[in-house]
Image (tube, coloured by chain):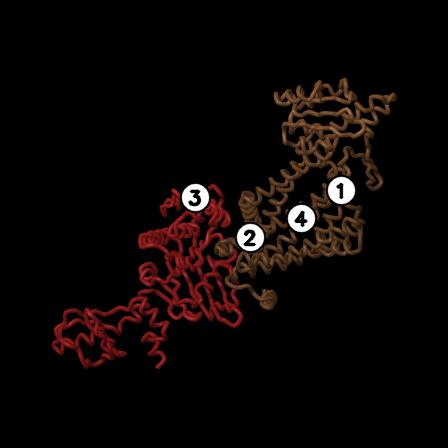
Amino acid sequence: MNEPIIHVQHLRKTYGDVVAVKDLSLTVFRGELFGLLGPNGAGKTTTIRILMDIYAPDAGEIQVLGKRPRQVRSRVGYLPEERGLYRKQRVMDVLLYLAELKGMPRKQAREQASYWLERVDLQDWAQHKVEDLSRGMQQKLQFVASVVHDPELLILDEPFQGLDPVNVELVKAILDELRDSGKTILLSAHQMNLVEELCNRIVLIHQGEAVLYGEVDAIKRRYAPNRVKVRTNRPLEQLPGVRRIERQEDGDLLELAEGVTPQSLLRELVRRDIPIEMFEVAPMSLNDIFIAVVQGESSPQEREARS
Amino acid sequence: MNFRKVWTIARHEYLVNVRRPGFLIMTGLVPLLGGLLLLVAAFASGKTMHMLERIFVGQHMTGVVDESGLFTPILPDFARDYQLYPDESSGREALAAKAISRLIIIPDDYLDSGKITVITASTGVDMANIADSQPLKRFFIAHLARGVPDPRLRARLVAPYDPTILHLNGETESETQGPFAYISHLVVPYVLSILLIMTIFVSSSYLLRGVSEEKTNRIMEILLSSVTADELLAGKVMGLGALGLTQIVIWVVAGFALSGGAAGLLGLIIPLFDAPGIFLLAILYYLLGFLMYAVLMGSVGALGSDMQEAQQLAAIFSLLAAVPLMFAGVLFSNPDSPIFRVISWFPLTAPTAMMLRLPLTNVPLVDIVGSLVLILITIPFVLWLGARLFRLGILMYGKRPSVREIWHLLRMT
């Protein structure tokens, strides 16, 4: 397949007796927008900090851009979850300093900083102190600080936090743009709908382990087949192969037993001559899957595998 | 370690802190105070009193009503500043017309009583100083001595001595001029030592504050995604060390300018360059001391969860470095006393102790070499420990680790 940009094998990290990351393996390929999901305390931030060489792992193998994290830190952009900039310094100075620390020459850094400030509509604030900016503007500036040195790999921890809907769209557009230009992006976010929209592959970490990993569509397909939404004017009862019926405003949500396909149910409904206004294989949203997995439910396949 | 990044950090730290109001005030205040001190010293000195009186009060004439006859006529030397008036009322008129700034009435029983009356229009410095005014005393003595036949004796009565002071300085004797040269010879290097010590604390407190701020406002994580903790610490120590040196250079240059500007009144800064070896040695101790304290302060700043806590922790080291200052009394009476030799050798107090001791006495070579060797042995250990504590502390939010935790983590890293 593609060139792996992040390659993590059996990563483990503990703080004293607390296991933050138990055994995590994942690969992110070039040009991907990869989603890192998980409830609070799942080990996302620890994983990211290890990728950024801020923490050392207890065990496991980590390669970033084909090398050890320390060797490539100037080619990686990082937006930490805990935001912060020099409040008393001017916007432009802060950006130049951070770009220079990443090894970018000052002249080029100035061009890049100007470009990005304009891109997020902060060009008029370049000479203002950071503390003069509104909260939303500071969030945008923080984002700019992570991309100003033109990194190949971008690691973003909750980039949409604290942004209003307009700016969420702006950042989304920029992320799409960056991906299209060949950058690789690792994104950690709580907003499932955004992850669903943006990412082609995800990993869901729970208690330090990957519980879901792969293409978003495949994951959804894996969870989807056994739920069907049907709208009819006839009450639906005692259908073979239906385990549970949940009445919703716009129809009934039918949970099918194992081995029962939507097709066989449709056949049964037609056979019974039930007038169907709507028949839809109900996909689970990523959010539902997230909640289901975290709360301990497992996918049908996993259930099968266990039995 | 990537030295370009260290350099970038050092430059940033320097530029940010050089603009701090605290730095500017302190850097400016010291030469200003020095200048003031110089003026006060000059004031106290009789020789320069007259000149300063002229500078501050302006040219003034003194009217004299001489009822005793001892001051008539006024000697040519004093005719420029003293004017006779036949009686009090004409004198008062001149005073009212501002032709003179004060009127001295010398009664006919002056020789018996010594009493005179001074009427003055101003309430300025000259008023307060009339009793001790050297020019006025000279005016009186010169006229009273008019009857002395021997002109040499007359001259000695007016100006009793013109001193040349020889200062014992090792094998050589150096000649110093002016009544305050001797004191300045002792005091100036001592004051400079104290300034150097202050600079160490000021710069390392900037380091402490900087680290603490970066930790509190969470920019630390971004920095650590670009540079290692060691590079960060090294850059900060270098940048702030340069800042401290800047301050010293400004002070020394200002000292030159001041003593030059004061028309050679007192060669205040000269003693410093009488013994350049001592000065250079003091700078060496300064650099080593700064390196040690800065690294310790930086790591301690990283361990505290906020500024206040960091400062409390840092107080331990400030106290340690200030121990020699507490023994200043011992130092002055006997700079080579055993207690001072002990703190000159102990690495954490040695830089400050030696900087205080060097200008006051001929420190035995064994003390200098011994303390330097001990400091040089200690520094790698301090750097090792400091860098580790720094690395540990910078990402630890919320709570300060206990001593046991620190020990445990130190052994793990």
Indicate the chain coloured brown by its letter.
B
Residue A72 appears in the rendering: no
B344 lies left or right of A183 = right
Q: Secondary structure at mark 4?
A: helix
Contact, mark 4 vs mark 2 (Cβ under 8 Å): no
Which chain does the residue under circle 2 lie in?
B
* Residue highlighted by disc 4: B197
Which chain does the residue under circle 1 lie in?
B
Residue A121 vs A43, above or below: the answer is above
Residue B367 image point, x, y percent: 78, 52
Residue in view at x 55 percent, y 47 percent: B13
Q: Quadrant of the C terminus of chain B?
A: bottom right
Q: Colour of chain A?
A: red
Residue in view at x 63 percent, y 41 percent: B30
Contact, mark 1 vs mark 2 (Cβ under 8 Å): no
Which mark's residue is nearer the viewer, 1 or 3?
1
* Residue highlighted by disc 2: B209
Mark 2–mark 3 distance (CA, rounded to whole Å): 23 Å
Q: Secondary structure at mark 3?
A: loop
Mark 1–mark 2 distance (CA, rounded to whole Å): 35 Å
Residue in view at x 58 percent, y 51 percent: B207
Q: Amino acid at mark 1?
A: Leu
Q: Amino acid at mark 2?
A: Arg
Q: Amino acid at mark 4?
A: Ile
Classed neighbour count for the residue bearing mark 3: other residues with Cα under 10 Å, few (<14), some (14–19), many (≥20): some
Residue A149 image point, x, y percent: 45, 49
* Residue highlighted by disc 1: B186
* Residue highlighted by disc 3: A128
Which chain does the residue under circle 3 lie in?
A
